[in-house]
Amino acid sequence: MPEWQTLFSALREHDIKVSDRDMPRPVGGGDISAAWRVKTEDNAIFLKTGPASSYDMFLAEAEGLRELAKANAVRVPEVRGCVQSAGESLLALEWIDFDLPGPDTERMLGQELAKQHRYCNDRFGWRQDNTIGSTPQRNLWNDDWIEFFTEDRLGFQLLLAAENGFTGELQQEGDRLLSNIGQFFSGYWPEASLLHGDLWGGNRASSDGEPVIFDPAVYYGDRESDIAMTKLFGGFSAEFYSAYEESWPLAAGSERRILLYQLYHVLNHLNLFGQSYLGRALGLIKSLV
């Protein structure tokens, strides 16, 4: 349990006026960090807490949310502060009450995500590394998307898999795929779009009919990467996809590239959660090869 009085003092240094009268209430916040609703003098904040080692991860998440806010597209929680105190770290965000999304919310999300993806950079990557789940995510700037995705996405995950004991066929087939990855990009050169980076159904919600996204793994890359993640575990409606396509249609060959981009996340799940994802990773690599 966090040392709340110490953390409250740290929050007040960031002009967050927390209330001493009410103890924080635990809320669902994922598998990596503890999450809390903390009352303030005027409303409440959403608080993530973790050990001191979580500080860099929280800082990167805060910077990612600020980057997404620059696009003035899909709503993201406002960052209130990121603090390290008494051997603990915390990230304070705007508290948002969620409700169930309807068809109009889904359409709005598709339109606003396309707008976010039109916020572009001259290069692929980002100014800092961050995490995908709890896995380090390298974001070294690169002018070449194929090189960036090969080395800092699939190649990095395959290296982690080998370190985790997943060698043999996975590495052999993975190397075959990496050596032929250019075939997926014949006649296609993506723009460096601002990506959420981990856009599965658990990282989106609705508030008063307005879509909200959170828990990002931000970088600049091929917009199809975000679409790939929305399709990996489900949770997005036909209205979402049709609205996105109307706003900015995907290029020819996107179906195959989406499978390629999904492989990054399947390999990450293999590295995070183990053997149960090995068959899915191998099957996906073989279908791509």
Image (tube, rainbow, N blue to C red):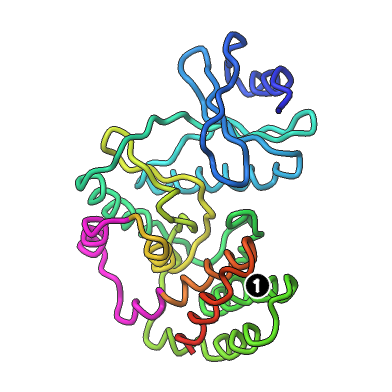
Disc 1 target residue: 156
Q: Quadrant of residue 12?
A: top right
Q: Is residue 174 left or right of residue 84?
A: left
- Residue pictured at 69% horizontal, 70% vertical: 160
Q: Position of residue 256 (x, y in %)?
A: 38, 81
Rendered residue at 48%/80% (across/down): 284
Residue 288: image x %, image y %?
46, 85
Front residue (pair 264, 278): 278
Image quadrant assignment for residue 3 = top right
Quadrant in the rendering for residue 18 = top right
Q: Say which quadrant the N terminus sits in.
A: top right
Question: Element type at marker 1?
Answer: helix
Q: Main secondary structure of the magenta part?
A: helix
Q: Residue furthest right?
A: 87
Looking at numbered disc 1 in the image, what kind of residue is underneath it? Phe
Q: Which residues are magenta?
A: 236-258
| Residue placed furthest toward the top | 21
